[in-house]
Amino acid sequence: MTPMVKAESVCKSFGALDVLKGITLEIGKGEVLCMVGPSGSGKSTFLRCINHLEEVNAGRLYVDGELIGYKERGGKLHEMSPRDAAKQRRDIGMVFQHFNLFPHRTALENVIEAPIRVKRIKKDVAVARGRDLLEQVGLSPKADAYPAQLSGGQQQRVAIARALAMNPKLMLFDEPTSALDPELVGEVLEVMKKLAAEGMTMVVVTHEMGFAREVANHLVFMDGGVVVEGGPPREILSNPQHERTKAFLSKVL
C-alpha cells in the first residue's frame, strides 16, 4: 500500500546552516505521526517541505505516491512551476502555530474563501460545507464572528475548519497549541483527536506528550536535523533508548 508520506534522505539548508540532514521516514494512510524535539531541531522545516513551502536541497518527498515540488526527467529533478506546486498543495491542509486568519473576514468567510477562489466551488455549496465544518469544530454559533471576537482556541479551530474545507488527504499541524493559553489547549486537541478517529492522516509537530501518547501511531524525536529515535509513542515516552531522547523527555514529561 502506498504510504501517504514518504521521505527519502531529505536535506534542507539555509545558507551554511544545515537544518535537515537526511530525513527518511514513512507515514501510512490514516496514521498520525507526532514529531517532538527541541526548538531548532528541524521539525517545522520538515513539515514545510512536505507541502513545498520550503524547497528541499536533496532527497525526495512523496505524498500519496506523487513526488512533491519536482518533476523527474531522465533521472534528474526539475522544480515544478509555482502553479503546479500550488495544485499539489491543495490536497495538503496545514494549520500553523499562529492562526493566520483574515482579520477582516468572519469565521465562515475565512472557511469558504479558498474553496470558492481556488476550487471554484459555488458559493452556496461552500457556505453549506463551511457551516457543517464549523459545527464539527464546535463553532456553529460563531460563524459570523470576526477573529478579534474569538479566543485563541476558537481561532485555531476556525483555522482547522478552513484547512478541512479543501478536503485534504493529509493534514499538517505545526505546533497548533503552543500559542494558546493552557486552558484553551484542550479544545483544539479534542478536534484533532476527532480527526484522527475519523481516519485523517496527520503529521503533528507538538510539545503535547499526552496527545502523542494517546493519539499517535508513531513518534519521532528530532534533534540537530536528524531523526534520533522513532517508534510507538508509549514505548519511546516510557523507555527511550537514546541518551539525547532521555535528556529531552526528562525536561518535558
Image: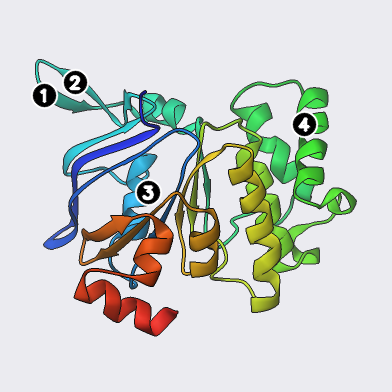
- The residue pinned by badge 4 equals 129
- The residue pinned by badge 1 equals 76
Q: Which mark is residue 1?
A: none
- The residue pinned by badge 2 equals 72
Q: Which mark is residue 48?
A: 3
Crowding at mark 4 (Cα within 10 Å: few <14, some 14-19, many 20+): some
SS label for mark 2: strand
Residue 63, position as x, y percentages in the image: 37, 31
Residue 64, position as x, y percentages in the image: 39, 27
Q: Viewed as shown, does residue 60 lie left or right of 155? A: left
Answer yes or no: is residue 175 visible: no
Q: Quadrant of the C terminus?
A: bottom left
Q: Pick whichever of labels 1 and 3 is earlier in the sequence.
A: 3
The disc labelled 3 sits on which kind of residue? Arg
The disc labelled 1 sits on which kind of residue? Lys
Answer yes or no: is residue 70 visible: yes
Residue that appears at 64% across and 48% down: 160
Q: Viewed as shown, does residue 249 lie left or right of 41? A: right
Residue that appears at 77% across and 37% down: 130
Crowding at mark 3 (Cα within 10 Å: few <14, some 14-19, many 20+): some
The disc labelled 2 sits on which kind of residue? Glu
